[in-house]
Image: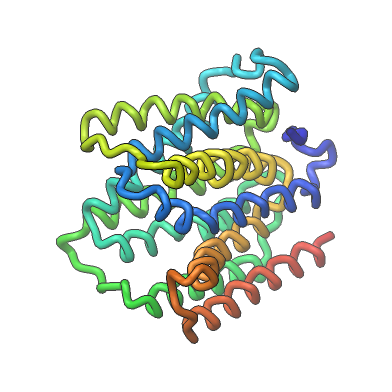
Amino acid sequence: MADASPAASGAPSANATRIGLIAILLWATLALATAATGAVPPFLLTALTFFVGGLVGLVAAVRGPGLRVFRQRPAAWIHGVGGLFGYHFVYFTALKLAPPADAGLIAYLWPLLIVLLSARLPGARLRPAHVVGALMGLAGTVVLLLGKGGFSGFEMRFLPGYLAALACAVIWSVYSVTARRFGDVPTEAVGGFCLVTALLAGLCHLLTEPSIWPVGAMQWGAVLALGIGPVGIAFYAWDIGMKRGDVRLLGVASYAAPVLSTLLLVITGFAAATWALALACALIVGGAALAARAGRAKT
């Protein structure tokens, strides 16, 4: 895997930023691939896919720095497992306690939070264009959700679910931005974090869910594809992007994931093209272009 250590100059690496964008592209396939796994409950699906994703890192470690890469200080393990498992645990909790569309909108505040929190990074200067770009991305996500007709309006009885969704956004944004502080931890170590996440998700499955396993080659193939791509390579690519890339640009660009996901559903016939989708595309692409221009202006 690519070197994930911070650049000596402290300046964002264009190559690392491009690698980070790969994660966003892979996450855009989540909805389509997850739908192909059938009725597998969320924690079991998390356990299976993170196990596969962990194996990806294990193979990379054996072929690269060796298994010693997993000998990391406790803080690195808390950061890695806390981010990966913590986010998914709270996200599934939010979906149980609030309407999925409402919870999803709140949870997707994390790209905006990444942009805002990036101002705390050494040498990072947050320009107004970055904030405006992130807000445009958020607006695009809202438009997309409203266009699907899934937004039901916030109700106080769902407050615990809303708070859980907000915790999702905070956990993932903090995990992402603070990855810079663990620049000495090789990206291959993420494989260990994935395996522990798989174990914890498996325990949650045994305690809270019925055991509905994938059926047939297609569903098992979808699980394998999820584990290798959106739950495997994506997290390694995101680690590289957060540690060495342009965090602000990646934060804004993250809003492209739900739009690209919807476009994939349209292409495959699972959803219809709408004006809301077109407007969401325009807002998110415009916001990302604005953030990219701000980054070039600084350089």
- Give coordinates of residue 214: x percent, y percent: 36, 40
Which of the 4 image quarters holds residue 53?
A: top right
Q: Residue furthest left?
A: 157
Residue sitting farthest toward the bottom:
275
Look at the picture and state if 9 lies above or below 154: above
Q: Quadrant of the N terminus?
A: top right
Q: Find the residue positioned furthest to the front.
A: 216
x and y percentages locating residue 75 in the rendered image: 52, 24
Is any atom of residue 79 visible in this view? no
Question: Image point 66% across, 68% down: which residue?
Answer: 288
The location of residue 149, given as percent across then percent down, is: 33, 77
Eyeballing the image, is 241 above or below 189? below
- Of residue 56 and residue 70, the one placed in the foreground of this image is 56
Residue under the image location 51 percent in, 19 percent down: 74
| Depth order, front residue of 114/235 | 235
298 displayed left or right of 59: right
Side of 290 where 272 appears, left or right: left
Question: Could you tell whether 163 is left or right of 120 in the image?
Answer: left
Query: Residue at the spot x=40%, y=38% of the render?
Result: 46
- Give the mark count: 0
Q: Residue at x 47, y 83 (%)?
A: 274
Quarter that holds the C terminus: bottom right
Could you say which quadrant of the image residue 176 lies in?
A: top right
Q: Quadrant of residue 103?
A: bottom left
Q: Is residue 192 visible?
A: yes
